[in-house]
Image (cartoon, rainbow, N blue to C red):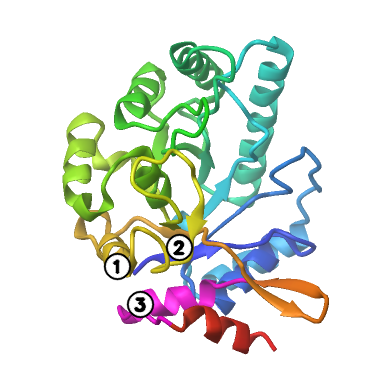
Amino acid sequence: MIIGSHVHFGSEQLLGSVKEAISYGANAFMFYTGAPQNTIRSKINLDYLNEARKMIIQYELDPNHIICHAPYIINLANKEKEEAWNFSISFLKQEISRCEELGVKYIVLHPGSSVKLTKEEGIKNIIEALNIIVNDDSNCMILLETMAGKGSECGSSIIEIKEILDGVNSKNIGVCLDTCHLNDAGYNMDEFDNFLDEFDNLIGLDRVKCIHINDSKNILGSHKDRHENIGFGTLGFDTILKIVNNDKLKRVPKILETPYISKNDGDKELLYPPYKFEISMLKMGKFNPNLLIDIRNYYK
């Protein structure tokens, strides 16, 4: 099972990311190169990078299973203010350059929200931007993430993702599926094989390079996008277990983005990562109904 989670890119940059992933028992991971809500970025520290590369080899991690996520502030769909749209293009190019420096081959991108524009205009703007950004010579591929359809989000259906992919001149672009987003967009994850057949017929499963594994707090088709811990949401453990073990996506890295677990410590509320426990649970293939309690007890 190729499985991991979101990890931090903190003071030790990629080295810290690798250490955190290993501590969770993961063989894949995803990170932001800085805060997803702003443009502040530190210069890549080559000493940390070299140590990270050594650890990647030592623990036999596959570089193809290391994923970057583009920051939320990038919005290629809205061109009402062309200066802001051009900034999104420029900043995404910078993020791709950072990925190339780090040796990371995939960067996940939310297609964007059209805001006051129509969705058709938003998709057109995304295509135009990607044709400026994407080229065959880059060593880092953009992966369009399937979205829940919240507000004016673009890319919440296979048809919309296909339209964007078909409009991009380069083939150096792929897809990241998200189980919570798919559920909230209206795709029944209990019928995941049917979804994959439809996706394969319209786009091709070879374009899927990453899957975000998340349960959902919401009912099917709610268009809300609220992640839940594995087995505690509307998808349920058995459905998610079938997805992570699906033979058609066996070699695709699965990345957990489930919520941190809260724990009260006096007058403070502390948050702890669930990933070590959720990864173990999925590897064992058995749901632990006491998962949240076990996590709180572990972090004493």
Residue drawn at (16%, 42%) of the image = 197
Disc 1 element: helix
Tell me the amino acid under the disc marked 3.
Lys
Give the residue number, with chain letter if any, for mark 3: 283
- On the image, the x and y values in percent for residue 49 come to 69, 60
Give the residue number, with chain letter if any, for mark 2: 62
**Residue 10, above or below 24:** above
- On the image, the x and y values in percent for residue 67 come to 52, 52
- Which region shows up in magenta? 273-289
Disc 3 element: helix
- The quadrant in which residue 163 appears is top left
Q: Disc 1 or 3, which lies upstream in sequence?
A: 1
User: In this rendering, would 41 be left or right of 186?
Assistant: right
Residue drawn at (76%, 39%) of the image = 38
Tell me the amino acid under the disc marked 1.
Leu
Q: CA distance from mark 1 to mark 2?
A: 22 Å
Q: CA distance from mark 1 to mark 3?
A: 9 Å
Give the residue number, with chain letter if any, for mark 1: 241
